[in-house]
C-alpha cells in the first residue's frame, strides 16, 4: 500500500463515519472533525517520521484541542500489529485497521512500549469489585500471580497491567476491565521562533495574554489560544499570503479558530476573507479581546 492509497483509505473511512474532512500538507495531512477534532499524519513506514514533524503535530494538536494520530503500516524491520497503539516521539501510532476500530469506538487501549504490551483498564471498577468480593490486595495478587505492590500500582492508576494480568483479573473477579481506547489531546509543548518576525509576533501575542507557539511544517506559522484559538500566517508580502490563504481559511473553520495573517509590507486588509494585519499594528493592541475585535472588523 503506497501513501496515496493509505490517505484515500483513511479519508473514505472518515467520510463513511460522517466526519468533516480537510486535506493539507505538512506535519498532518488530514484534519477530521465530528464530536472530536483529529489531526492525522500518514506514513507507510513510521521510521520516516522525524522529531520536528512530531513536535509540530503535538503543538498544533494542543493549541486547537485536537487528538493527533500517526497512521502507518510498518517500521524498517517489521509490520505493525493491528490491535496495538504504539508511541513515536510522544504521538500515538496505529495501523489503518486499528484507526478504523478507534473511530468506530471498538478498540481497546493496548499499548506497546519497550517490548511490553499493557492494557488500559477501569482501575476504579477493579478496586470496587475487589472490595465487594472481600479480597485483600495480597490475596488477589497471589491468585493472579503478581506482587501485592504491582496490584497496588495498578489500582492506583500508576501503571497499566499486562494483557495476561488483565485476563487473570477478569477471570477471578468475573468483570470486564479493559477500557475502550479514547483519543487524547497531548500535553502542552512549544518550540522556538526561527526568524525575527515569528519571534516578534509570538512575543506580542504573549504580551496580550494569548498562549502561543511557533509551528513548522504547517500552512501557518503560529498557533495559540486564550478564550479562543488562533492560527497566524506570517509573510513579508501579499503573494505568499495568497498562496496560503485558502488552506488557512478552511483549517480555521474546521479548528473553530480565529485566523489572521501578519505582514511586513502589504496594503491588503484581507485575502480570501482572512484578515491581514500589519506588523506595526500588533504593538498597539492591548488585549486578546481587542485583537479578536480587530480581526473581526478587518475581516468585514
Image (cartoon, grey):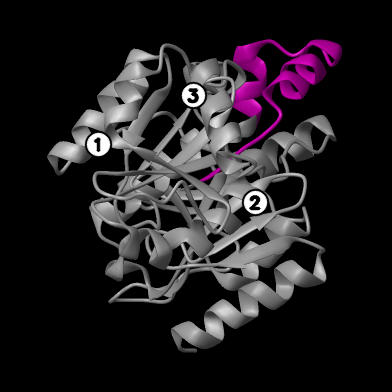
- Element type at marker 1? loop
Residue 70 in the figure: left or right of residue 105? left
Q: Residue at x 63, y 63 (%)?
A: 99
**Mark number, residue 291:** 3
Callout in the foreground (1, 3): 3
The residue range painted magenta reads 118-143
Q: Residue at x 70, y 45 (%)?
A: 36
Q: Position of residue 267 (x, y in %)?
A: 36, 49
The foreground one among 191 and 115 is 191
The foreground one among 211 and 291 is 291
The foreground one among 193 and 184 is 193
Q: Kindly report the secondary structure that dominates the magenta region of the rendered protein.
A: helix
The foreground one among 238 and 98 is 238
Q: Does residue 131 show up magenta in the picture?
A: yes
Residue 147 seen in the figure = no
Q: Position of residue 225 (x, y in %)?
A: 49, 27
Mark 1 lies on residue? 191
- Element type at marker 2? helix
Callout in the foreground (2, 1): 2
Q: Position of residue 33 (x, y in %)?
A: 70, 53
Q: Earlier in the sequence, mark 1 or mark 3?
A: 1
- Element type at marker 3? helix
Amino acid at each position: 500500500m503506497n501513501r496515496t492509497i493509505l490517505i484515500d483509505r483513511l479519508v473514505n473511512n472518515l467520510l463513511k463515519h460522517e466526519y468533516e474532512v480537510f486535506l493539507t500538507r505538512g506535519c498532518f495531512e488530514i484534519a477530521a472533525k465530528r464530536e472530536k477534532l483529529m489531526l492525522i499524519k500518514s506514513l507507510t513506514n513510521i521510521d520516516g517520521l522525524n522529531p520536528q514533524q512530531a513536535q509540530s503535530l503535538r503543538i498544533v494538536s494542543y493549541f486547537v484541542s485536537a487528538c493527533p494520530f500517526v497512521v502507518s503500516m510498518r517500521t524498517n524491520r517489521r509490520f505493525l500489529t493491528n490491535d496495538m497503539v504504539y508511541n513515536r516521539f510522544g504521538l500515538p501510532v496505529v495501523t489503518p485497521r486499528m484507526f478504523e476500530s478507534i473511530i468506530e469506538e471498538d478498540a481497546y487501549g493496548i499499548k506497546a512500549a519497550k517490548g511490553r504490551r499493557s492494557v488500559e483498564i477501569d482501575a476504579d471498577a477493579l478496586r470496587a469489585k475487589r472490595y465487594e468480593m472481600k479480597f485483600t490486595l495480597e490475596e488477589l495478587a497471589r491468585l493472579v500471580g503478581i506482587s501485592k505492590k504491582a496490584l497496588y500500582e495498578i489500582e492506583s492508576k500508576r501503571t497499566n497491567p499486562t494483557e495476561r494480568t488483565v485476563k487473570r483479573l477478569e477471570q477471578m473477579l468475573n468483570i470486564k476491565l479493559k477500557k475502550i481506547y479514547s483519543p487524547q489531546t497531548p500535553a502542552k509543548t512549544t518550540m522556538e521562533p526561527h526568524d525575527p518576525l515569528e519571534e516578534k509576533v509570538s512575543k506580542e501575542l504573549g504580551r496580550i495574554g494569548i498562549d502561543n507557539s511557533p509551528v513548522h511544517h504547517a500552512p501557518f506559522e503560529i498557533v495559540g489560544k486564550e478564550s479562543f484559538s488562533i492560527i497566524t500566517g506570517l509573510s513579508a508580502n501579499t503573494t505568499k499570503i495568497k498562496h496560503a490563504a485558502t488552506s488557512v481559511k478552511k483549517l480555521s473553520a474546521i479548528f473553530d479558530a480565529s485566523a489572521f495573517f501578519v505582514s511586513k509590507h502589504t496594503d491588503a486588509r484581507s485575502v480570501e476573507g482572512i484578515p491581514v494585519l500589519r506588523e506595526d499594528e500588533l504593538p498597539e493592541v492591548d488585549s486578546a479581546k481587542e485583537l479578536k475585535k480587530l480581526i473581526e472588523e478587518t475581516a468585514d
